[in-house]
């Protein structure tokens, strides 16, 4: 029998160990009511990367963007500052900081656009966006979370800042695991429509540039935050 062949037991153990996903070591299939190891020592989810969003005050966003680029210039890719992927990418394999949006317009142009929208009662954000306030964001690899978040808070200005993990479980990453730092005078966290995020399965995501979409090529809002209602294009490797 197998117990009489210890080499086979060892071989099977090695295969099992090598097959373990370091970003889903407990083989979770449902991430609701779970927490991440960063937040609690016994948390079963794993953080793959982080996002820092700087939101709400459009006029102050260009200042923050350019100051962030200057502060962390050596950590950005040599080919440019913009991420080569969309907002639902979270893999730990990308080593650089990058901006999830192109360079913002100068503050005078942003203010002119705001006046135009107010005059025509035009919504600030397009249909299908999870965001109810203007927002921009940087992708942050695991190694750079502490220094980028500390700098962001010290240089906040009039922005509402959000730090959140990318675990693949986007509903809770943007709600129960969200860390807001509000601007002076702001008292309520901006609302995020979390069912407009496409993925709710551990360690998954997508490269939106492959779908010409900001929701992994799927229609949102999702029916619920259950894993079975996640977008079919949310994958472990992409």
Image (cartoon, rainbow, N blue to C red):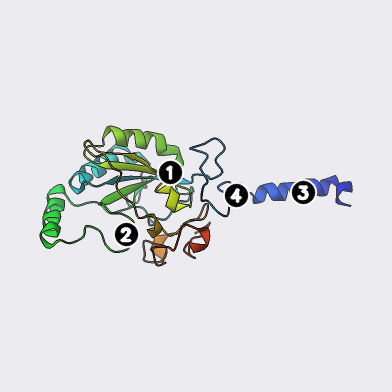
Label of residue 11 in the image: 3
Seen from the viewer's position, the closer of residues 224 and 67 is 224
Q: Which residue is mark 4?
A: 21
Q: Quadrant of residue 87?
A: bottom left
User: Distance of mark 3 from mark 2, alpha carbons?
Assistant: 49 Å
In the image, 4 versus 195, the foreground residue is 195
- Whether label 1 touches label 4, CB < 8 Å: no
Q: Is residue 196 above or below residue 72?
A: below
Instruction: Say which label, 2 or 1, has the lower sequence index.
Output: 2
Q: Nearer the viewer, mark 4 or mark 3?
A: 4
- Kindly check if marks 4 and 3 are in contact, taking CB atoms under 8 A apart as contact: no
Please name the residue that numbered disc 2 is placed on.
129
Secondary-structure class at tag 2: loop
Q: Residues within 10 Å of mark 2 (few under 14, many from 20)?
A: some
Q: CA distance from mark 1 to mark 4?
A: 22 Å
Q: Position of residue 137 (x, y in %)?
A: 32, 48
**10 Å crowding of disc 4: few (<14), some (14-19), many (20+):** few
Left or right: 6, with 209 as reference point: right
Percent x, y for residue 69?
A: 29, 42
First of labels 1, 4 by sequence position: 4
Q: Residue at x 34, y 33 (%)?
A: 150
User: Pointer 3: residues within 10 angstroms few (<14), some, or many (20+)?
Assistant: few
Q: Which residue is mark 1?
A: 177
Residue 65 place in picture, x, y as percent: 26, 44
Measured Cα–Cα span from mark 3 to mark 1: 39 Å
The mark nearer the N terminus, 3 or 2, is: 3
Q: Is residue 137 left or right of residue 145?
A: left
Crowding at mark 1 (Cα within 10 Å: few <14, some 14-19, many 20+):
some
């Amino acid at each position: 029998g197998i117990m009489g062949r210890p080499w086979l037991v060892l071989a099977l153990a090695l295969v099992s160990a090598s097959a373990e996903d370091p970003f889903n070591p407990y083989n979770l299939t449902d991430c609701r009511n779970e927490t991440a190891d960063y937040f609690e020592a016994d948390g079963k989810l794993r953080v793959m990367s982080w996002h820092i969003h700087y939101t709400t005050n459009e006029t102050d966003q260009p200042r923050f963007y350019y100051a962030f680029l200057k502060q962390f210039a050596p950590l950005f890719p040599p080919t440019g500052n913009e991420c080569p992927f969309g907002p639902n990418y979270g893999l730990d394999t990308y080593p650089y900081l990058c901006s999830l949006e192109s360079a913002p317009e100068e503050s005078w142009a942003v203010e002119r656009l705001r006046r135009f929208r107010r005059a025509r009662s035009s919504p600030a954000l397009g249909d299908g966006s999870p965001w109810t306030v203007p927002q921009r964001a940087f992708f942050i690899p695991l190694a750079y979370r502490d220094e980028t978040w500390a700098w962001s808070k010290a240089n906040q200005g009039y922005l509402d800042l959000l730090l959140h993990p990318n675990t693949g479980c986007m509903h809770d990453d943007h709600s129960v695991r969200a860390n807001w730092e509000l601007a002076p005078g702001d008292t309520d966290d901006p609302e995020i429509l979390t069912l407009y995020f496409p993925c709710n399965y551990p360690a998954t995501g997508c490269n939106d540039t492959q779908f010409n979409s900001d929701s992994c090529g799927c229609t949102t809002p999702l029916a619920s935050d259950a894993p079975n209602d996640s977008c079919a294009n949310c994958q472990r490797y992409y």
